[in-house]
Image: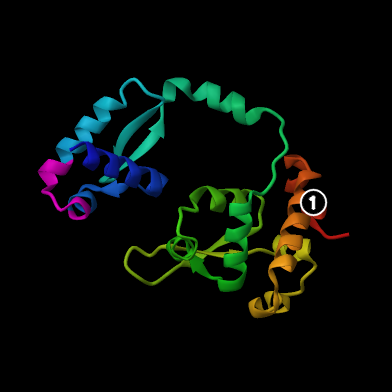
């Protein structure tokens, strides 16, 4: 049962705000929904004295921070700080640029890991945007790059991106280093101004 709790905890972490349904958990663990419900209740009790809590909304279960501690989180995020794009965010940005419109699930399939945080960061920096929904089951969100992305890299359109087969590893590293350097030189307030994102 300990392993099953670990699996559920991992699934809740991977899914983030999207959450998981009781049915999904039961199918994944190959147990009844009643058994899955009991495991969720046990997990909820284990988190009673932790910083996260297990919530159920709209038929889905997900982790969330505690409301009574929200002022600490607000204080943390209100502090002035420099923000840069991580290597993971740059990888996600490249995948979106070359494959847009693309769903989060497809991005994660390509990278092999969750990309929820990276997508949130790229949305915040206005480098990507929501570009409608796919016409498949669940209608997942599609993502694409923005005009800000084109302006920053000095592109007229995505057609000007170099073909992947012609880009060597050293060239990729140089572009990533340049990208990271430019972001490190800017504050969050400057990044919000599109003029600050343009190449000089």
- Magenta-highlighted residues: 27-36
- The majority secondary structure of the magenta stretch comes to helix
Looking at the picture, how far across and down is residue 29, in whole percent? Answer: 19, 50
Is 31 placed above or below 80 here?
below
User: In the rendered image, is residue 57 in sight?
Assistant: no
Asked if residue 34 lies in the magenta stretch, the reply is yes
Q: Residue at x 37, y 37 (%)?
A: 63
Badge 1 marks a residue whose secondary structure is helix
Front residue of 140/104: it is 104
Is 177 placed above or below 48 here?
below
Front residue of 109/140: it is 109
User: In the rendered image, is residue 52 in sight?
Assistant: yes
Name the residue beneath numbered marker 1. 182
Asked where in the image residue 94 lies, by quadrant, the reply is bottom right
Front residue of 83/157: it is 83
Q: Residue at x 60, y 59 (%)?
A: 91
């Amino acid at each position: 049962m300990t392993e099953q709790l670990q699996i559920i905890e991992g699934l809740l972490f991977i899914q983030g705000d999207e959450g998981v349904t009781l049915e999904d958990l039961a199918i994944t663990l190959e147990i009844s929904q009643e058994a899955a419900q009991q495991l969720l209740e046990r997990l909820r009790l284990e988190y009673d004295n932790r910083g996260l809590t297990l919530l159920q909304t709209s038929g889905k279960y997900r982790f969330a921070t505690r409301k009574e501690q929200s002022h600490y989180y607000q204080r943390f995020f209100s502090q002035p700080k420099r923000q840069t794009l991580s290597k993971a965010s740059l990888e996600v940005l490249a995948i979106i640029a070359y494959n847009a419109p693309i769903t989060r699930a497809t991005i994660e399939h390509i990278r092999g890991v969750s990309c929820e945080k990276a997508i949130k960061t790229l949305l915040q920096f206005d480098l990507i945007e929501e570009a409608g929904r796919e016409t498949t089951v669940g209608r997942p969100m599609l993502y694409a790059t923005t005009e800000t992305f084109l302006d920053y890299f000095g592109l007229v359109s995505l057609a000007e991106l170099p073909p992947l087969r012609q880009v060597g590893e050293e060239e990729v590293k140089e572009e990533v280093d340049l990208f990271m350097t430019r972001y490190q030189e800017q504050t969050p307030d400057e990044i919000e101004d599109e003029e600050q994102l343009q190449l000089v």
